[in-house]
Image (cartoon, rainbow, N blue to C red):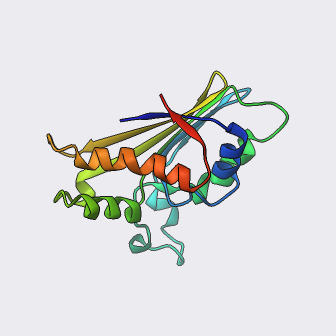
Amino acid sequence: MIALKINNKKDFMSKLLVSELFDDFLVEEASIDTFVTFSIDGRIHGDFYKNDADYSEDKITSDLSFWSELRQICFDLIKGKRTPLGFKFVFHAGSNVKNNILSETASGFTEDQVSLGLTIKFHNGDVVLTTGTAYSFFSLDKTIEKAWDEFIPSFLEKSGISCEIL
């Protein structure tokens, strides 16, 4: 696990809320503190799509929503004259990124055995990103965790986002 402090908050927030940069991440939860706290549970309710011909169960590839589906809602809650008191987004790597990391590490783990998390938190004027790795069983093998901890700073740097390791 590593923590990264974002150096240019305005640029980062634009890339998070306006661009498609984070759209392939899955959202476990979102919490935005303004005059009230808005909480979003990113878990998909399959029953919502029960009578919708455009959405069948086989089209829903995850239990979690993509950031692309929630980004505009969160942007609408955050934008305005006043800065939010805080926010917290809990993301997970989508299948493509996760499978790339799993294949690069050649660890033998499968996609359903590991979760690669990224928490984005705004508190006391700072934006901090924290990585995390969870396994569905006990393992002493930390190769995936190390690869995830290397991927996020590299992803940010390639995206023109300046940060420092805390």
In the picture, measured across the screen, residue 65 lies left or right of residue 9, that is left
Q: Outermost residue toward the bottom?
A: 53
In the image shown, does 32 or 110 lie closer to the viewer? 110
Left or right: 132 in relation to 5: left
Q: Quadrant of the image for the N terminus?
A: top left
Q: For residue 74, say whether it is visible.
A: yes
The correct choice, above or below, for 137 with respect to 105 in the image is above
Dividing the picture into quadrants, the one containing residue 86 is top right
Residue positioned 62% across, 61% down in the render: 20
Q: Position of residue 72 (x, y in %)?
A: 69, 53
- Residue situated furthest right in the rendering: 81
Q: Residue at x 69, y 27 (%)?
A: 36
82 or 12, nearer to the observer: 12
Q: Is residue 77 above or below residue 65?
A: above
- The percent position of residue 21, horizontal first and vertical second, equals 59, 58
The structure residue drawn at horizontal position 29% and vertical position 44%, both measured from the top left corner, is: 145
